Image: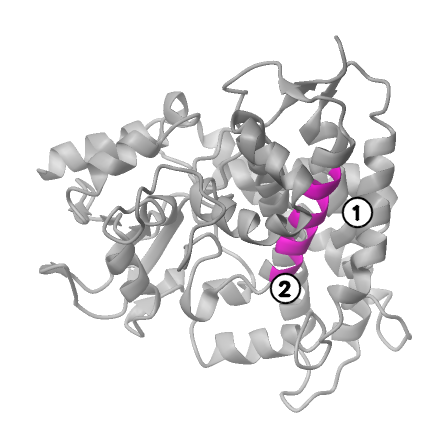
Amino acid sequence: MTTTQASDMLRRILDYSSRADPYPLYAELRKTPVARQEDGSYVISTYREITDLLHNPHLSSDTRNLSRPAPGVASQAEPSFINVDPPEHDRLRRLAMRHFGPPHTPRLVTGMEDALTATVSGLIDDCAGKEQIDLVDDVAYPFPVAVICHLLGVPREDEPRFHHWVDDLINSIDYNPETDPKEKLDKGVQARKDLRQYLGGLLEQRHGKPGDDLLTRLANDDGPDGRMTDEEIVSTANLLLIAGHETTVNLITNGMLTLLRHPQILQRLCDEPDLIVPLVEELLRYEPPVHIIPWRAAYSDITVADTVIPKGSQIMLMLASGSRDPNRFHDPDRFDPDRRDNQHLGFGSGIHLCFGGPLARRETQIALSQLVHRLDRPRLVTDPPPYRRSPVLRGPIHLHIRQGDG
């Protein structure tokens, strides 16, 4: 594939018209595992090469190591730990993990299961008797938002404010100066500022006060690695607020869409509740919430599949393509909850493996289990449904489901 052909293929993948089904385009892209673009960036589309790079210490997550700034990456006063490299990344991740999971808070997720079930059950109760529901608005969005607000200590009544901020941030991730209005980027920059200011105001109220929410714990923690600065806490909270609900919304919605397209598996889940654990893992491979890591930088010259990627080059990792690579997964375009050796890229890999993955998994397991057992003969109103604009965090913006005899 020539550079021009590779660039055209990427444009087709990023174009909204391909959002409902980008997988045939990924298959074409995989014929050239390392595809150089006309702008000098590189797109990696095969499982082995993606995995090798995610574990390569010469790959940087810090935008400052790009030879030229990526157009969709706005500057930040203090980047979150997914956008910095070791050893700073390791320190910040350890500080966050002390309050988010093992080994210091091993029962965070399991201790929430009753509350998670009650929350999603209440949302489904509100759908009872409705001939038609929107799974996104009625269940998949409000459920993880309520959870992350509770964990961070964000007042639930403030949710509508950051809903708009998050939408603008997500929309600006894939900003292309050649095709997109500058307003798209400007709205993302302003949303980032507004959200940081809001979280900073909440943090100021937490210093020196007791509390179990994550903001309070981070504000008053004196662990072996010291304490995060206020800027670092705000960046971490910003990351959790966005990643903590946006990916789970897509995972739940993609999951229900996939089950409705595979009614035999939906019925099997009703009959075999324990199937939900491998089913969600297969979902993370087959219809993942995160399709693309839009940029990484080469610390130095890197050789990938016999191609030398120069130092400072922007590298785009096509995670969803890698998880459908036939050289790694047998019959990859088939949804198979019995699949073994399912080391997908749904939550990434390497040092930046999604640290909220266990919570997102359990939220999705509970939500899908409740939905398939309690909705009355659900069926799709429109297939394919309308999708969000972003090719990076991919999922339906609405999923209309008809139930009952209507």
- Placement of 401 over or under 162, stated as above or below: above
Disc 1, SS = helix
Is residue 136 depicted above or below 318 in this figure? above
359 drawn magenta:
yes
Q: Is residue 167 visible?
A: yes
Q: Is residue 146 above or below residue 160?
A: below
**Does residue 257 show up?**
no
- Measured as percent of width and height from the top left, residue 105 is found at 73, 76
In the rendered structure, are the residues bearing label 2 and label 1 in contact, judged by CB atoms less than 8 Å apart? no
Residue 301, by quadrant, is bottom left
Report whether 351 appears left or right of 276: left
Quarter the C terminus occupies: top right
- Residue 382 occupies quadrant: top right
Question: In screen coordinates, is 386 left or right of 228?
Answer: left
Comparing labels 2 and 1, the label whose residue is closer to the camera: 1
- Residue 236 badge: 2
Q: Where's residue 43, x and y in %?
A: 25, 47
- Tell me: residue 350, above or below residue 263: below
Q: How is the image coloured?
A: one colour
Q: Give the label on residue 190, or none.
A: none
Neighbour tally class for label 1: few under 14, some 14-19, many 20 plus, Cα within 10 Å:
some
Residue at 57 percent of width and 32 percent of height: 259
The residue sitting at the bottom extreme is 224
Residue type indicated by callout 1: Ala
Indicate yes or no whether the magenta region holds residue 198.
no
What residue type is disc 2 on? Thr
Q: Position of residue 274 (x, y in %)?
A: 65, 52
Q: As rendered, which of 148 and 122 lies closer to the eye? A: 122
Residue carrying label 1: 146
The magenta stretch is 358-370
Q: On the picture, is 3 further left or further right than 100?
A: left
Nearest the eye: 317 or 254:
254
